[in-house]
Image (cartoon, rainbow, N blue to C red):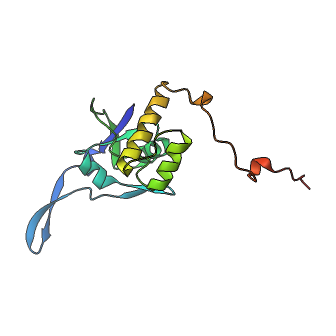
Amino acid sequence: MQTVAYALREAYAGTVQQLEDGQPVEVPVYLGGLLAVDDERDIDVRAELDAGDGTIVVDETDLELVRILDEYPPLKRVAAPADAAPTSSKYEAVKAPDLRDELRRRELDATGTKPELIARLEAHDAAVAAGDLDVANSPTPEAPEGDAGDDTTPEA
């Protein structure tokens, strides 16, 4: 799996002192931001930076998240650590039943905890991206009866 990493630009890095109850306290220059990635997912930039020791690492195939982070002024691309795993997953905001449905659609094991379901989907995505799986020749579920694909109504 290829990754893309981000860190704060110099102008946003570090800490400053501010007074709280008359006492000086060190606070980060950049306090954070919540970015909407799509209709079902957002990313808490400060939380992701904290979780990744100052770096956000994402899967390069998560194109919408990469685009959002590329366009976010406080962040810049940096070299990803060799052993870095994505700190954010495009599947985090998806509910477990929907993750199970996606696993079944891909004909994969749909049992386990939400982190296990996410790990299975990410592993499958990585195998597809690496060319280890031929998804073009994989079976696809047939459309249920009454689906739009079965519409034989003539157009007016």
For the N terminus, the image quarter is top left
Residue 94 vertical position relative to residue 126 in the rendered view, above or below: below
Q: Nearer the viewer, residue 85 or 10?
A: 85
Q: Position of residue 120 (x, y in %)?
A: 41, 40
Rendered view: 39 above or below 59: below
The image quadrant that residue 80 belongs to is top left
Residue in view at x 33 percent, y 53 percent: 45
| 15 versus 83 height, above or below | below
Closer to us: 149 or 10: 149
Q: Nearer the viewer, residue 72 or 130?
A: 130
**Residue at (51, 27) in percent of width and height:** 133
Q: Position of residue 39 (x, y in %)?
A: 51, 57
**Where's residue 70, x and y in %?**
42, 43
**Residue lying furthest bottom:** 21
Residue nearest the viewer, comparing 108 with 130? 108
Observer able to see residue 94:
no
41 sits left or right of 21 in the view: right
At x 46%, y 45%, the residue is 110
| Residue 71 appears in the picture as rendered | yes
Above or below for 63 versus 47? above
Which residue sits at x=70%, y=49%? 144
